[in-house]
Image (spheres, rainbow, N blue to C red):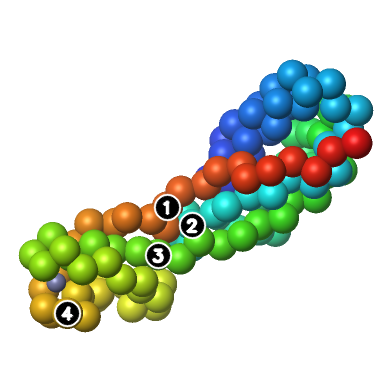
Amino acid sequence: MHELPVMKSILDIVLKQATIHNVRSVRAVQLEVGLLSDLEAQWMQRYFDYLSRGTLAQEAELKIQWNPIVFRCQECGKSFEAERKMLPDVACPACGRKHLSLVSGREYRIRNLEVE
Ligand SMILES: [Zn+2]
């Protein structure tokens, strides 16, 4: 499962921040996740619950904001959003070429922690 190592690294960061800031418990973790990351919210929460048992972040809720998939055309420089269902046949809306680089969509990061 793809989510397990990702949630492990997220939890490590959460616990490190919580310790630095003398937090009693983490109530929620706000995450930004790209729509191309192949992470599923249900599994992220399930693995997080499993991994965080007995830690400061036990029972913390994951609040996920999904980031759009954004490409930049390498021919004309236009940036544009793409739907997942348009892939892999996506072409630049300005020039019609398919020489694209991914700007965002695969990333995941912690935005904020809600703590006590
Ligand atoms: Zn273009």
SS class of the residue under badge 3? strand
Q: Amino acid at mark 3?
A: Ile
The disc, 4 or 1, on the residue closer to the chain's N-terminal end is 4
Identify the residue position indicated by label 4 in the image: 94
Mark 2 sits near ligand 1, with its Cβ under 8 Å away: no
Tell me if I can see residue 53 in this picture.
no
The disc, 1 or 3, on the residue closer to the chain's N-terminal end is 3
Whether the residues at callouts 4 and 2 have beta carbons within 8 Å, the answer is no
Q: Position of residue 7 (x, y in %)?
A: 63, 39
Whether the residues at callouts 3 and 4 have beta carbons within 8 Å, the answer is no
Whether the residues at callouts 2 and 1 have beta carbons within 8 Å, the answer is yes
- As measured in the structure, the alpha-carbon distance from the residue carrying label 3 to the one carrying label 4 is 17 Å
Identify the residue position indicated by label 1 in the image: 106
Q: Residue at x 13, y 60 (%)?
A: 74
Q: Amino acid at mark 4?
A: Ala
SS class of the residue under badge 4? loop
- As measured in the structure, the alpha-carbon distance from the residue carrying label 4 to the one carrying label 2 is 24 Å
Quadrant in the picture for the C terminus: top right
Identify the residue position indicated by label 2 in the image: 34
Q: Amino acid at mark 2?
A: Gly
Mark 4 sits near ligand 1, with its Cβ under 8 Å away: yes
Nearer to us: label 4 or label 1: 4
Residue 69 - label: 3
Mark 3, other Cα within 10 Å: few <14 / some 14–19 / many ≥20: many
Q: Quadrant of residue 72?
A: bottom left
The disc, 2 or 3, on the residue closer to the chain's N-terminal end is 2
Drawn side of residue 109 relative to residue 52, left or right = left
Q: Residue at x 57, y 39 (%)?
A: 6
